[in-house]
Amino acid sequence: MIYLTSDLHGLKLEKLKALLKKAGFTDNDWLFILGDVIDRQNDGGVEILQWLLNQPNAQLILGNHEAMLLSCDFIFEEITDESINRFDTRKMQLLSNYMLNGGDVTLTFLRMLKNKTPEAVDDILEYLREAPFYETVSAGGKDFLLVHSGLDNFSPDKKLSDYTADEFIWAWPELTDRYFDDVVTVFGHTPTFTYGEEYRGKILKTDTWIDIDVGVPYGNNPVLLRLDDLEEIYFGE
């Protein structure tokens, strides 16, 4: 079985594990997290990232929040005269933007981890640098494209390899947008309640795409989507 979740934004690891247990997730199943594990609450997702490093059957697809963290990886460099001289206006803007988007809590816990186990932070950053922008899978007789935000500047004739990183992680699809007719695109990034209050805390499905960002940092419980039968598993139900 293939399970998906997205935009956990600092969800406690124990809550993710409880949801996987409810779904009957086993070592023979696969979990894809469609980006934005980090930022905004609790430990900023650091514990889930450490957990992912040791999960052979789980994969993170890069989200815009992970990309913002990577753009600020200079903050973990050893402080030297040279590194201080390299800390220019551009880097200050990147760091300020990341902090304004909820990155402060993640940076706090990563610094704590670095003080305790420096190599652990290096492993996390390397894992994020190697995370893919998309995956294609088949389940239940259907083909799926898994990506963080949908596809900006979409064209059915455009190859996936021709999309830029920003087009994978910063798209904001309209409810009327259509993607591929023969492949279901699954993404997060846009909380479903922004399409209407009737979708708050729920997965939104159209005939060509599925949005699984149920708005976890806005007080909603996480959800799993099982691709094999499109069953939705909600926490606490």
Image (tube, grey):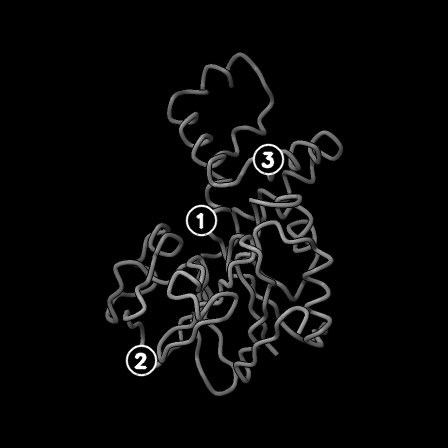
Percent from the top left, x then y, of residue 48?
66, 52
Q: Is residue 53 above or below residue 210?
A: above
Residue at left offset 51%, top offset 59%: 215
> Is residue 35 rendered to the left or right of residue 110?
left
Percent from the top left, x then y, of residue 49?
64, 50
SS state under label 3 = helix
SS state under label 2 = loop
Say which amino acid is labelled 2.
Asp
State the residue in front, 127 or 108.
108
User: Which of the two labelled residues, at mark 1 and mark 2, occupies the earlier sequence position?
Assistant: 1
User: Which of the two labelled residues, at mark 3 and mark 2, occupies the earlier sequence position?
Assistant: 3
Percent from the top left, x then y, of residue 137?
49, 74
Say which amino acid is labelled 3.
Leu
SS state under label 1 = helix
Q: Write down the residue under mark 3.
A: 107
Q: Is residue 87 above or below residue 204?
A: above
Q: Write down the residue under mark 2.
A: 181
On-image quarter of the C terminus: bottom right
Marks 1 and 3, Cα distance to the nearest angstrom?
16 Å
Say which amino acid is labelled 1.
Asn
Q: Write down the residue under mark 1.
A: 64
Residue at left offset 53%, top offset 61%: 6
